[in-house]
Amino acid sequence: MNAHGRAGARRMRLRGLLRKEVLQILRDPSSIAIAFVLPVVLLLLFGYGISLDARKVPVALVVESPTAETASFTASFFHSPYFEPRAHFDRRGAEEALFDGDVAAVVVLRSDFSRRLYGPRGAPIQVLVNGTDANTARLISGYIDGAWRAWLDQVARDSGIRLAAPVTIESRVWFNAAVRSRNFLVPGLIAIIMTLIGALLTALVVAREWERGTMEALLVTPVTTSELLLGKVVPYFVLGMGGMALSVVMAIALFDVPFRGSFLVLTLSSALFLLAALGMGLLISTVSKNQFVAGQIAIIVTFLPAFILSGFIFDIESMPRAVQWITHVIAARYFVAIVQTIFLAGNVWSVIVPNALALAAMAVFFLGMTRRRTLKRLE
Amino acid sequence: MWHQIRALVVKELLAVWKDPRSRFVLIGPPIIQLMVFGYAATYDLRDVPVAFYVEDRGSDARELVSRFAGSPVFRTVAWLERESDIARVLDGRDAALVVHLGQDFSRDLRVAQPARVQLLIDGRNSNTALILAGYANAIVRDFNLDWLRRHGERMPPANLVVRAWFNPNLHSRWFIVPGIVALLTLVVTLVVTALSVARERELGTFDQLLVTPLRPVQILIGKSLGPLLIGLVEGTVIVLVAVLWFGVPLLGSLVLLYLGMVLFLLSVIGVGLMISSLVRTQQQAILGAFLFLVPAIILSGFATPIANMSDAVQLLTWLNPMRYFLVIVRGLFLEGLPAALVVHQLWPLSLIAVASLSAAGWLFRNRLA
């Protein structure tokens, strides 16, 4: 056979394979659902659902003996948008409310508050927070701290004495001036959803072919391993990129997340990430050859690590060194960094290039491993 | 009747157990995940990279900077020379925080004008940004109090004395690890159940099951008991690791914990069987499991508080069994929640279990048998 004929035959085989995959996708619409329905549902649910900005924190205010001074202090809580204050007259009731979870914090002004206010050591204001959820507890005590400082400023202005702190903080939060958690959660969610789509689309497909024995049938045809893989990757790659485009449009149009980078860079890095995710899915199904195992592994190595180890919510730098090493094998980690940067900061090459290279390396590794594992089965 | 069901349960357990790979995925990964996530999932910041841009050489400036640099929360990565360097280190994520003291810092302090310290924070993760700002606030507040005391100035008239109940040192690991108990039992049990019927239908053995003398309701019971046992063993192992390895205090009663776990598992099994009877292939079953799992986890309060969600989504969380079980697990672990309060979580959980199991039973009769 001459070179021209071989190339023609290869094209024909590939076309046949692609046709088979596309028909399979169309016959069982679950793949299309994964690519398009899953991102829409998840983004809507999470975009509106999750937020780390505490709002209207219920706080019990215990004023043991009300005076003008205590009233001026509690007023700062009633005027704050962060609190939903509830007046209590005794400490016991407030502590019970804290125990039952009806309030998140208790602020106690003791009966000697006004008397000690201008004494040498000042009056203590007791704050009890429910520490079960440490993160929320810290945020709430931060809000209470803010209310306390606003009240001190007020006292200083009213009494004309200088009480202002010697050093004041002027913070500016870059890339997300309003500190809106949605701005970083939505780009992170896109990365997680893409991990799901990429791995789910392919993890089960090949496992099913092994389980049903149709893989052996394919392997005895003249189709080469590379063609076989290409035939599997291309259709799902197209589906995945479609899902990605849909998610990005939703993030910008629906959730008003600022987009400061370029679409071209985002498209290229998404393509790299998708190849890595599809490669991982293919490898899972090639190794497990059983849909039950492939499904369990897909859930275990995709969604949960992408959720917890990618830096999406939990800060990677704060994890123990050993766990930080593990995060390096999670593709979502690199993609989360890229997507958050492209959305909020712009094309920062020092972030994008190393992360994109890591994704490319993972894609090559997973696809190469899948190819080797499939070759071995032939023998 | 019972020995027939027992035979079915034994068969179910064998179906999962006899294949070494599926045996492995039930044991290995959950333990590995518990260990990794237990250490990874924390909101407590450590070693946050910080850069300083200090234009003032006074001793007060030096003292404030050393308080930042000496804190275990921060790790100094750079001393900047030019203002333009600020953008460079923040953009490239080399530093998450830049502390800037202007050249007037010492002079302002001397002449009793508020001296400003500027904090520039990377907001790409706004949660980390807020926590960082909180730590920085505390450092500056301590500096202020010490400075006032040293210079014999008037102290502020009132001070906050903050105490955290149940978790005095505010370890977020104590909060997260009990949550992982709920997370992993949910994942394993749901997938086992969702695939059990789907696999038999795909392989054609379900028809054989239907021609046995077993009635559909007996098949349903048999199909639920297997995953229930698997889930209970899984949950027990994870609780043991949480207590013995991570040292999370378990203050509440074990009876209540297991009561909650059984009800939670039954609700999850009901959902799994519903998925199983609605789908035709294992692929669709896995998809269905995912479609339930991902929202159930994200909308449970596991990582982000339910109180922060929008009102409509909060209503939706009432249907989520994991929401109740999380309150039970965390309450029993950290607060020693009394039975009277656990009941508030148990009855919705039983309603969900009854509803999902009856729906599964109905689907069984009408779609399969």
Image (cartoon, grey):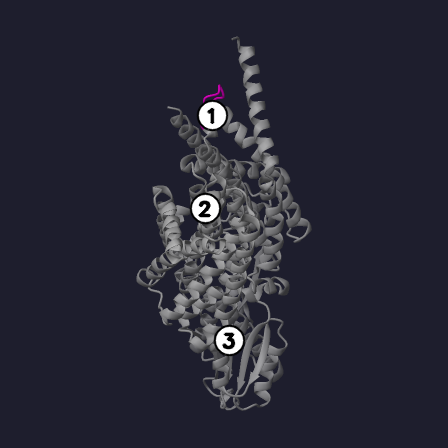
**Residue A105 got which mark?**
3
How far from the left and from the top, in percent, is residue A44? 63, 53
Mark toward the viewer: 3 or 1: 1
Q: Can residue B43 be seen in this view?
A: no
Q: Is residue A173 left or right of residue A362?
A: right
Seen from the viewer's position, the closer of residues B68 and A39 is A39
Q: How crowded is mark 2: few (under 14 residues within 10 Å), some or many (20 or more)?
A: some
Disc 2: which residue: B209
Residue position for label 1: A217
* Position of residue A249 measured from the top left corner of the image (x, y, whole percent): 66, 46
Mark 2 belongs to chain = B
User: How far across and how far down the image is residue B122, in percent?
Assistant: 54, 54
Q: Quadrant of residue A210?
A: top left
Q: Which chain carries label 1?
A: A
Q: Which of A140 and B209 is in front in this view?
A: B209
A331 in relation to B265, above or below: above
- Residue at 58% across, 78% down: A85
Disc 3 marks a residue whose amino acid type is: Ala
Which mark identifies residue B194? none
Q: Is residue A343 visible?
A: yes
Of circles 2 and 3, which is in front? 2
Mark 3 and mark 1 on one chain: yes
Among the two numbered marks 3 and 1 on one chain, the one whose residue lies closer to the N terminus: 3
Q: What is the spatial separation of the Cα atoms under label 2 and label 3, in whole angstroms?
A: 57 Å
Which stretch is magenta?
A: A216-225
The residue closer to the viewer here, A210 or B57, is A210
Where does residue A252 sit, x and y in percent of width and height? 66, 49
Label 3–label 1 contact, CB within 8 A = no
Q: Nearer the viewer, residue B323 or A52?
A: B323
Does mark 3 fall on the same chain as mark 2?
no
